[in-house]
Image (cartoon, grey):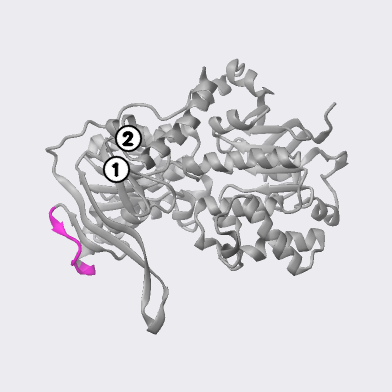
Amino acid sequence: MAETLLQVRDLHVSFGDLPAVKGVSFDIEAGETVALVGESGSGKSVTALSVLQLLPYPLASHPRGSILFEGEELIGADKARLLDVRGGKVSMVFQEPMTSLNPLHTIAKQVGESLVVHKRLHPKAALQRTLELLRRVGLQDAEQRLGAYPHELSGGQRQRVMIAMALANEPRLLIADEPTTALDVTIQAQILELLRELQDELDMALLLITHDLGTVRAMADRVCVMTDGEIVEAGEAERVFNAPQHAYTRHLLAAEPKGEPARDNASAPVVAAAHDLTVKYPVSKGWFGAKRYFAAVKNVDVTVRAGQTVGVVGESGSGKTTLGLAMLRLIRASGRIHFENRDLSTMKRRALTGLRRDMQVVFQDPYGSLSPRMTVQHIVEEGLRVHYPRVPIDERRNQVAAVLTEVGLEPAHMDRYPHEFSGGQRQRISIARAMVLKPRFVVLDEPTSALDMSVQAQIVDLLRALQRSHDLGYLFVSHDLKVVRALANWIIVMRDGEIVEQGPANDVFERPRHDYSKALFAAALDLAVDERAVRQ
């Protein structure tokens, strides 16, 4: 009989008067993978953080109930005992490695720190072990990366570093909180395969926190479905997916972006275009002070028409986001950039400011792009105050109320702050901020990647509705090919700053010509097959 490693019994957690976790109970056996599945706000991450007592005290009340690890109670345990467990026996990999890694410390220092603290290794021995770990998790050029800082690595590379840190002391339990959510499909597949290999090698248990059903199907032995702080269904993964009992479980299984993109109109006017667009960043100085450059975008041509969505896909580091920012003249670039027959390439800043209202952007992380110190009204009306300073306050408030209604929010909530909204609601606020100025061209930079599947579907529906109502041209940057297929009628595939293939969406998806496109879509297909199997 397998050893029961973790026992959670009747766990309760509250934030002030708001209950976040309500009577949760589950077990994890040695070497087993248990997935906590649910939408944002369901209590998944709070439950996971409770295991290591990492909740934000005193904002969160101390958990009530029992959390036994190897038969020892963790709730109420003293600081010394918790420090011994954290990192030594139980480790955690967080969703966004860029915010989890210290930007001021090198990779070597951050991975080696745990070895020095828990295993008392000499710094030289810790460095050697760090190198072994980085190689084990598949980080390319590991020796050269020891002195690198987090910002010098891609998203997939940073996640590998996080896994190396978590595995430094060979924990018995690894808690992985949305470890692949922000990664490209090919990198997702690599990270999942790495976790499987390491789990088998170390006989390690895994508590997987995710809303991605393909990931759950590929990884989990047992599943606990959470909503509103409670586990509403639990059991063997095959049984839960093939014969779901609870209505919420069936809702999760059915949720995905659906529908068809707007019909492409080749005669529609061009709203934005780039010709021979190149973006270079200085890397270092060579001999005699000559600068060396890294080309993030290389000689790219892009055209976006009114009512059209051009989807830009590719792995992290391919130049997708850089292309979008360059087309808005938010970063320096060479080549020609046009907006509605106006040449932006040589336009002075003052003249360009007048066009900003017609060219907008929606970023990936709505929590990071919305000021926590401003109310929703002030966030949404900020562009109005810049571009239409003479509009009376009451009229601005009416315009904010109208656009909030259009994006599916309550105007009565405009005096609230971003932290009072869910992730999907915050993204609607970001969209409202862009739409209040009635733009003609919008760059959407991964606007759904941080959202749950059902919320993704809602945002896709909203973006299509806004496009139809206002004849908008979208440049849609994403690594989620399901979302791209639901929105885009023209596809650009980028790799290493270059366009390797482009064409009508159906042609590129169904009959990709370039080997890279084929590999990219094949990786997405593997994950999609897992999700379709879940729904059957």
Residue at disc 1, secondary structure: strand
Q: Is residue 30 left or right of residue 440?
A: right
Q: Name the disc covering residue 381, or none.
A: none
Tell which of 15 and 154 is nearer to you.
154
Extent of the magenta region? 341-350
Which residue sits furthest bottom? 288
Res 469 seen here: yes
Which quadrant of the structure image shows residue 492?
top left
Q: Earlier in the sequence, mark 2 or mark 1?
A: 1
Q: Is residue 36 magenta?
A: no
- Image point (27%, 35%), residue name: 489
- The majority secondary structure of the magenta stretch comes to loop
Residue that carries the numbered disc 2 in the rendered image: 512
Q: Between 110 and 108, which is closer to the camera in this rendering?
A: 108
Given residues 42 and 376, the one toward you in this image is 42
Rendered residue at 76%/65% (across/down): 125
How far, Cα to Cα, is label 2 from label 1? 8 Å
Residue 345 highlighted magenta (yes or no): yes
The kind of residue on which mark 1 rests is Glu
Residue on which disc 1 sits: 501
Residue 462 location, quadrant: top left
